[in-house]
Amino acid sequence: MSGQRRPREAAFRDTARMPNVTGTPNSERNDTTSRRRSRSAAMTRPRNPTWRPTVTGTSSARIGMSNHLSSLRVAVHASAYYVLVLCAGILLLAPNSAPLAVAAEETPEEITFALVPKQVNNPFFDLADEGCQLAASKLPGVSCLYVGPTDEGDAEAQADIIDDLIAGVYGPIHGISLSVSDVEIATDAIARAVDAGIPVVTFDSDAKRSQRTAYVGTNNDDFGQEMGKLLVQLNPVGGSYGIISSFAPNVMVKANGVRTRLADTKWTEDPTSPKDCLGDIDLFYEQLEEFAADPNVGAILPVGAWGFLTDDSTRWTSIKDKYPNVTIVASETLPIALELMNRGYVDGLVGQLPFNMGELSIEALWDLHQGQQIEEYIWGTSFMEVLLFPLELPDVNMDYNYIGKLAILGYVMFGLIAASSIGFATWTYVKRTKRIVRASQPMFLVMICAGVLIMASTMIPLTMDDQYYSQRATDIACRSLPWCMSIGFTTTFAALFSKTVSEESGGLDTVVLRAVEQLAAPVL
């Protein structure tokens, strides 16, 4: 049986079961035989589609499979690691990314500040509205609502508008800037707004005792004083003046400022002043003509802009043409006021800057909305003064305070003192041999007379001024005053002191000797 040839399939199976021993001399031969047999088996394998070739060498197959599984395992572990890292990153970023997405989708908060004037369609307050709109456009999400009564001085209507703002009729309101028409009514309205959580500031006209946070505008007392100052500059001669005012708080403060400035001048207020125009333009022109027609009234000071709230200036010009000698110092520098002044119908103007009031009102409310502290008084506007100088100015009367005839009194007094001093000195010299004179030490008596004469000579340069003397002469006289006074006083006092010391200490020689000994004692 050993010599018989085995079938190829059996040989193939036996070969597959043979160990693949490496490192022996027969390894190459065995590999060659295995490859040859494998080719033969491949040539004789049945055509079975599910058949797969058998890998020769059981150990090599296991090692290859192990390496493949290890690579696969490493790949799976790496994939799982990256998946875990990705999930962890998503979880970490999720809490922060959600608000960002929401914030990106949310729109900025709409903030509305209300500007409530005394009257809408008023040139003065319309300028404040322009400043309000400009300031609001510079802030993120801020808008300015301009709303107010149609008639000036309608405090009840103004209070109703504030109540509407509180109730949200105009939408959510985050702050109010109010020009006060009536202090008591506005104080109650401001309290209701503050209780509703709406901060309030005032502008142009204030209510100090209310709960408003700040006042934005002009110092109205200083404004009135500036009007009085312009009147004195225009007409320092003085006379009687009349004030046209109203019940508005800021206007009354201006009127008091006028009185304060003119109190120490030659101007006095007319008994019929002030006249209350109630904010009515027609009544204002009636009162303006009443003052102008009064021969005792030399100046008119309207402390409000009622005459400039209309484009028709013929009523103003007709009054001024009829009474050209009356001096008018008006309030506010609106365009029609400047036009009238350029035409010579107004003598002086003191104005405010309402545009700045509107700007600063919104800025103050914005700071309050941001939780910041603001000052109680924001003097945001300066004064604008326009003065019309007359063509013929009065002569300037300068008082130089000349001595005049008082110089004669000075000369007489000096003559008496000089005569007395010279007379006593002469008498001392003549009587120097007499016992009483010798005991009084004639030398000191003459020194006293000379010192008094020198001191009295200061009255001569004191009577010299540039009314009768040149500048050089007055300069010399001025410089001589301290010299004459100091030399004369020193001479007189030295004689008196020396005489007193000599009588108490045994003579002047003894005093000098003792002084020398005291000075020389430390050296000796």
Image (spheres, grey):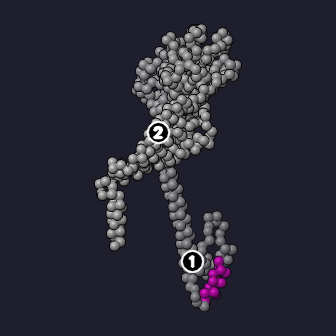
Instruction: Please give the residue where the numbered disc 1 appears in the rendered image.
Output: 60
Judged left or right of residue 198, residue 301 is right
Residue that protrudes farthest toward the bottom in the picture: 25
Q: What residue span does the magenta drawing correspond to?
A: 26-38
- The residue sitting at 56% across, 85% down in the picture is 21
In the foreground, 333 or 54: 333
What number is the disc on residue 456?
none
Q: Is residue 319 above or below residue 415?
A: above
Q: Is residue 449 above or below residue 116?
A: below
| Residue type of the residue flagged with mark 1 | Ser
Report how many numbered discs are placed on residues in the image: 2
Kindly report which numbered mark, 2 or 1, lies closer to the viewer in this rendering: 2
| Residue type of the residue flagged with mark 2 | Ala
- Element type where label 1 sits in the image: helix
Q: Is residue 254 magenta?
A: no
Mark closest to the chain's N terminus, 2 or 1: 1
Pinpoint residue 58: horizontal percent, then vertical percent: 55, 77
Q: Is residue 200 visible?
A: yes
Judged left or right of residue 138, residue 455 is left
Pinpoint residue 418: horizontal percent, then vertical percent: 47, 40
- The residue sitting at 70% across, 19% down in the picture is 343
In the foreground, 313 or 46: 313
In the foreground, 44 or 382: 382
Pinpoint residue 304: horizontal percent, then vertical percent: 56, 19
Image quadrant in which the N terminus is located: bottom right
Instruction: Please give the residue where the numbered disc 2 appears in the rendered image.
Output: 419
- The residue sitting at 55% across, 45% down in the picture is 479
Query: For residue 141, what is the image quadrant?
Result: top right
Density class for disc 2 (Cα within 10 Å; few <14, some 14-19, many ≥20) is few
- The residue sitting at 63% across, 83% down in the picture is 31
Pinpoint residue 114: horizontal percent, then vertical percent: 52, 26
Q: Is residue 362 visible?
A: no
